[in-house]
Image: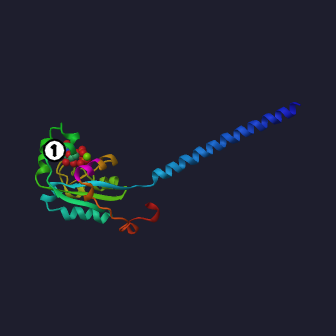
Amino acid sequence: SSNDRINALSDALTGNLKSIISSFDSIRSKTSRQAEKQEKKQMERTLVLLKPSTIERALVGEIVNRFEKKGLRIVGMKMMQLTDEILAQHYAHLVKKPFFPILKASMMKTPVIAMCLEGVDAIAVVRYITGYTNGRKADPGTIRGDYCMSNQQNIVHASDSPEAAVEELNRFFRPEEIFDMGDLNLDRLYAVDEL
Ligand code: IDP
Ligand code: MG
């Protein structure tokens, strides 16, 4: 009868609707799970160089102290003399700039201290506490804001992205110069769900 056909049609439509809704639900829960995963912060390593401006002004202790007190773990640290070659790589994005020769000379004036710092989200955290490139414009409370007046002699270098951190750590450290600290201090530095 026509009633039966209407009922059958309506059942089919309801079924379709239910399956559409359930596939929406499954997409929604998948994307929210993905979002949660992405929000979970990563244990990262980043490169910091204490520039000759830090060495010359006898600020090594103060600057190391800043990073240490923040809770970044020092997992590699050494003094080294930079060369033309390593600076051409390290500052590849600046070699064509008119100030490059002066920058290079200032980076070779004394040895530098290279540090590998480790922590959850360490790359962004270190950039944040390093502050804006030009010390005259950097916020007070940041290292550059607190310790320098220069755009060029700005106390520290810090890797600016995960890709740069990997590349720069490889450039300045041999693998055996970076140490695995295991879970040393992690329970003091982070909540259990942050690791
Ligand atoms: P960053 O160190 O904040 O990442 P970059 O633009 O990558 O800044 O430049 C690398 C370094 O080159 C700076 O830290 C600074 O020492 C120097 N530098 C950058 N721009 C200038 C400039 O306009 N004049 C002089 N030196 C500069
Ligand atoms: Mg940079």
Can residue 75 be seen by looking at this rendering? yes
Number of dots carrying numbers: 1
Give above or below for 77 relative to 18: below
Residue at image point 18% right, 39% down: 95
Can residue 151 be seen by looking at this rendering? no
Q: Is residue 100 magenta?
A: no
What secondary structure do most residues of the magenta stretch adopt?
helix
Q: Position of residue 118 (x, y in %)?
A: 32, 59
Residue at image point 56% right, 47% down: 30
Q: Position of residue 153 (x, y in %)?
A: 16, 51
Q: In the displayed structure, does residue 103 sit left or right of residue 21? A: left
Camera-side residue of 140 and 104: 104
Camera-side residue of 12 and 54: 12
Residue at the farthest front position: 176
Three-letter code for the amino acid on which mark 1 is drawn: Glu
Residue at image point 30% right, 56% down: 129
Give above or below for 130 relative to 20: below
Residue at the farthest right position: 1
Q: Position of residue 67 (x, y in %)?
A: 28, 61
CB at disc 1 and ligand 1 closer than 8 Å: no
Q: Answer with the quarter of the image where residue 195 lies.
A: bottom left
Q: To which residue does mark 1 refer? A: 85
Q: Answer with the quarter of the image where residue 60 lies.
A: bottom left
Q: Position of residue 28 (x, y in %)?
A: 58, 45
Q: Which residues are magenta?
A: 167-172
Crowding around mark 1 (Cα neighbors within 10 Å: few <14, some 14 to 19, many 20+) is few
Residue at image point 28% right, 50% down: 159
Q: Answer with the quarter of the image where residue 101 lies.
A: top left
